[in-house]
Amino acid sequence: MSFRRRLLLLFAFSVGVSVAVVTSIVSTMTRRAFDQATDTRTAALVQQFRREFTRRGEEVSRKAETAASSPQATRMAVAAAQPIPDYSGFLDAARELAQTERLDFLEFADNRGTIISSAQWPAKFGYKEPMALWPAPTSPFLKEEETPHGAELGLFAVHALAAGDSKLSIIGGVRLDRTFLLDLDLPNDMRVMLYEKTEASDHGFSSRHLITPSDSQEDAGQLAALIESVELTGREASVITTSKAGEEMVNAFPLSGENNQLLGIFLVGSSRQIYNQLRREIRLAALIAATAGLVLAVLLSSWAAARVTRPLEQLAEAAREIAMGNWKAFVSADSRDEVGELADALNRMAGDLLEQRERLLQSERLAAWREAARRLAHELKNPLFPLQLTVENLVRARSQGPEQFEEIFAESATTLLSEINRLKNTVAHFGEFSKVPKPQLEKVRVDELLQHVASVHRAQLQQASVECRVETSGVGTMFADPDLLHRALSNLMLNAIEAMPTGGTICLKARQNSGWVELEVSDTGVGLSPSEAQNLFTPYYTSKQHGTGLGLAIVHSIITDHGGSIRVESQPARGTTFMIELPANHDAVRALPGNHA
Ligand code: ADP
Ligand code: MG
């Protein structure tokens, strides 16, 4: 993976993680704050409900008292005090009083619990009302009341009126219905509901018993579990419901009756729309932040990558050039960071390498010349020894007498001449080697050059039964000295022919490789051992009895004068390949020290 991509991934990852973390923290905090606010408001509402409950209770209590002080009540008390009371005249009394007092429920009962008059159910006259037997509760309470239309939940207060030894109980109440709920002062996004817990509703949840401020009962089903759970535990609980209007948090509070029995459930719904809206906005903000972060990550990573990778690419390019032999490659290191340090180090290394190479070349040159001098001395010593012997023989013969001298003179003269000839030859070759001229560059067609070299040696090839192939597909021209190149290739050809005493194949190949021309001379001859291959280009190195050992030294000098290089690959008994690389470009060759076009 490229540095740029890695950087981008890293940036993107950091942005993503931070945005996610911030979003989740903000979301959590918002939810907590919202829930807290909801709890506070719900508590306030419950408080309000309780206050309203108490207020209504007190009102009911007051009304019951007013009813108790009415003339009818006094008459009923008088009747109740009789040993055999006659209640027949009071059938409608409760209903009339209830109407004037605006009570939903009103009943009068004597101390035996007998109902004297009932507003909600007149036919109950004469029946027993157990509440009248108990001591009257001091505060208002919730109670389920039987009516001809079924059980109803009401808020009741009891008032007792003394009648001689007897007692008259006045039980007044109001229905807990929608009007009660509508009287509560509610914030816009909240609503309250009441669930009546009557005997009829004992058998599971029924939406009929749910009193809501409006007629809609659409989400009643979702409250069933909540209500059942409160019924079961008797403790408050909450649930989140969803409907067309959005999410709603519903808290349920049990309403207990006088004996702590569950009579109803007060439900407070708080819309979560604002919270959901807020959450959507937070998510949108996070999305925008993440996108912006991502764009920023792309820009930053490209910028950072450019700042780091461009100098690195320059460094790599310089390193490549140095590896290719351009020791003067230099990287500009203007930054003060690690990359600058690296560039500095590379520049220093290239400088050191250049210096070391100069020193190495110097000592190599010296060693080569020592070797050459040693071999030249050897070459010169060989004929000198027979020369000395012959002259000593002649001197000795001269002292022995003229006949003796005459006898060996002719023979000695021949030896002397031939050895002197050999010396002359050695000196001539040495002269020729030292006189290799500098290349005179001109445009050379590579294929023609190779064809020419092959054709010049046709006679020798035929004689040694060697086949010669020339392969020059796709090669154009190059700038070189044709005579010198011809001489170099001829030397390689001759060596190849000599390496194949029983015949074989020579292959002359040329290839174009961008700015370079590659030449190859290969044979199927005796080959070279690795140690032989090492000394090949040293002047006077030869394995032949009459060889000069200068051929390859001359080849090497011609090729390096052209700015090229030569190397050898060989396998003993398989063959040898000489590979030459030459710059094809005019400028590249001319740029070499001492060359001119
Ligand atoms: P010379 O040909 O006079 O010996 P060169 O410098 O031309 O001198 O060659 C040096 C030596 O390199 C040769 O003596 C020979 O041993 C070895 N040599 C050169 N070319 C080949 C080749 N194609 N195959 C095997 N050996 C070779
Ligand atoms: Mg040779």
Image (cartoon, helix red, strand yellow):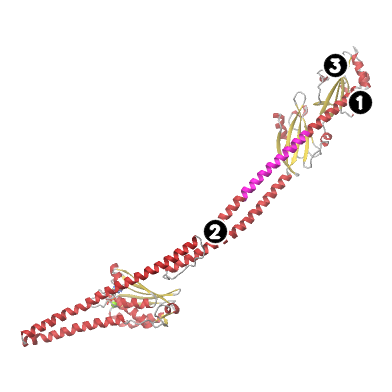
38 part of magenta stretch: yes
> Sequence order check: which comes first, mark 2 or mark 1?
2
169 part of magenta stretch: no
Q: Which residue is mark 2?
A: 5
Marks 1/3 in contact by CB < 8 Å: the verdict is no
Which span is picked out in magenta? 19-47
Identified by mark 3, the residue type is: Asn
Quarter of the rendered image showing ligand 2: bottom left
Q: Residue at x 79, y 41 (%)?
A: 187
Identified by mark 1, the residue type is: Leu
Identified by mark 2, the residue type is: Arg
Q: Residue at x 64, y 45 (%)?
A: 25
In the image, which disc is placed on residue 409?
none
Q: Quadrant of residue 126?
A: top right
**Magenta stretch: dominant secondary structure:** helix
Quick check: 120 above or below 475? above
Residue 554 x, y percent position in the rendering: 32, 78
Quick check: 124 above or below 366? above
Task: State the residue in front, 534 or 202.
Answer: 534
Quick one: SS at disc 3?
loop
Residue 314 x, y percent position in the rendering: 49, 66
Quick check: 222 above or below 23? above
Q: Which residue is mark 3?
A: 111
Residue 8 x, y percent position in the rendering: 56, 57
In the image, which disc is placed on residue 97?
1
